[in-house]
Amino acid sequence: MAHIVIINPRFGVSFWGLEHCMKLFGKRANLPVACLALLAALVPDHHQVTLIDENVEDIDFDVLAGADLVCVTGMSIQGRRLIEIVEAAKTRGVMVAVGGPMATVEPEVFDGLADVIFIGEADVTWPQFLRDWEEGRHKSRYEQAEKTEVTSLPLPRIDLLKIDRYMFGSLQISRGCPFTCEFCDIIVTFGRRPRLKTSEQVLAELEAFQRAGMKIVFVVDDNLIGNKKAIKPVLRDIIRWQQERAYPLTLFTEASLDLAEDEELMELMGLANFQNVFIGIETPNEESLRETKKLQNVRPNAGTLLERVHRIQSHGIDVWCGMIVGFDHDDPSIFNVMPKFLSDARISAALIGMLHAIPTTPLYDRLKLAGRLNDDEDSDKYGTNVVPLGMSRETLRDGFLQVMKACYGADAYFQRLDAQFIDENFKFTLHQLPYWQSNRMAWARRCVLNYARASVLATRLLSQVKDERLKMRYRQQLSRVLKTRWREPHILFIYALKVATHYHYDAIVRDLARAEHSNDVMPDAGRSFSRVKRRVEERAVA
């Protein structure tokens, strides 16, 4: 029996990580990367497996020294720390394997550093390596030729995660996306043919999270609705599972904007208790959308961007979105247009970043050929490796900071939040269901729980936030929603969550402003959208 340690390095502060408000939630990190528990499940039972997520625990390097194999997985945004861990393990004489998105798009970084490198999906090559290793004939490089048949994947070892330290669980239903967005590496890594797990697999994972005490699960698919026909029966089975148990789990996910074009799909997602969906809107500039081949967002017959966002919201699903500045068709006017769009869309949470060219993507190849890629030093200085076309690098960096300040100032943020939750009286699908008429006791328990959770979070927020200006504003916001929607405890809880997350966004903007005034390098939280967004999307790439 061998002792195998699988490590996910810590992340820097980012929009999505919510690091500044984790203490308010009583947690250490937002969610575990999906690959950790799956990689553990792919290890034969006769080996001992230890999972270490540095985002919720420190690494005990004495444990590494006693391991037979250390496997480190991570993304480029984790790169510096990933390399440090590999080097630390090697100095202790331990065999080291490296995989994940960074090893897939930048394998040359690990040549001569790691003993084994995995490229691409590793659901087949990881077990193959373990067999070769046991027999003393392993290779130094493994690259999976075919895409994984996800219906063959085992139940992830959720039991090995320190699940109580996370806000959300992470579950994957599908891999791949049918679209061809120029800046995205999803189709490079996972292909354009969406591959889905069976309903039985999905329900087994939901069961595992429920047993572990998790209340919220993020379905980490890059595009849950990439195959609309195939996902609908899975959603119907999730609905049945949820209703048999009085809806124990809240779900949220990522999907493309064409969700707004399918009434049945929106209804099914709402009934399955998908309360939030993250959508890559990217920009209100249609020329930029065409430039980057985000053609699913430019469909005149489907309505404008705003109309489609509002359509999804009207179906009881809250919309988060990703926005990007720095496309070739962007000029400095985009820095004024984007905040107005978000205000009109009533989207409170928007992950805003500068365009970044990921190696292996069509965008990277195009810009490299044109000589429009920053070196590492300039990438750190300007926050992106892209040399913009319609403005200077300084204008792009300064404009990005302008957008962040405009969107996450308290007045702008709470105007968007109140426009949806107070002015529009937004309601989640779950809380409008006739289902609760015949499940009154379950509904009562849910209401009591949400009143309690809202009260605890509001108390923590007002006691732990030290900035008196923010504390006063948060008290005003909580008072306003209490006066207008006190009969709806679920809304009070979600609204309190959104007030708390503003504390995180405000801290990020202040960090960016300090870097601007000191002429320092761009903090991790200000790095480009594509790099930060990938932190929640790491799959079974060892």
Image (cartoon, rainbow, N blue to C red):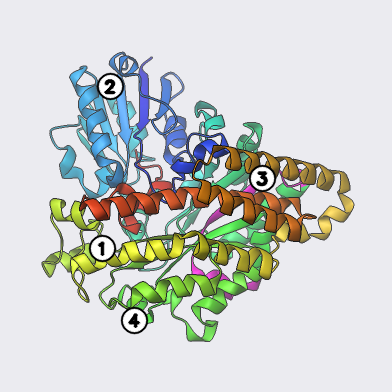
| Residue under pointer 3 | 249
Q: Quadrant of the C terminus?
A: top left
Segment colored magenta: 244-263
500 w.r.t. 460: above or below: below
Earlier sequence position, callout 4 versus callout 2 = 2
> Is there a contact, CB below 8 Å, between mark 3 and mark 1?
no
Closer to viewer: mark 3 or mark 2? 3
- Nearest-to-viewer mark from 3 and 1: 1
For disc 2, the marked residue is 135
Task: Decide if residue 180 is in sight here.
Answer: yes
Residue at the spot x=20%, y=44% of the render?
A: 107
Q: Earlier in the sequence, mark 2 or mark 1?
A: 2
- Which mark sits nearer the N-terminus, 1 or 4? 4
Q: What residue is at 37 percent from the left and 51 percent from the top?
A: 510
> Helix, strand, or loop for circle 1?
helix
Quadrant (top left, top right, bottom left, bottom right) of the N terminus: top left
Q: Residues within 10 Å of mark 2 (few under 14, many from 20)?
A: few
Q: Quadrant of residue 398?
A: bottom left
Q: Amino acid at mark 2?
A: Glu
What residue did someone put label 1 on? 397
In the image, is residue 95 part of the stretch drawn in magenta?
no
Q: Which mark, residue 482?
A: none
Q: Amino acid at mark 4?
A: Glu
Residue projecting furthest to the bottom = 301
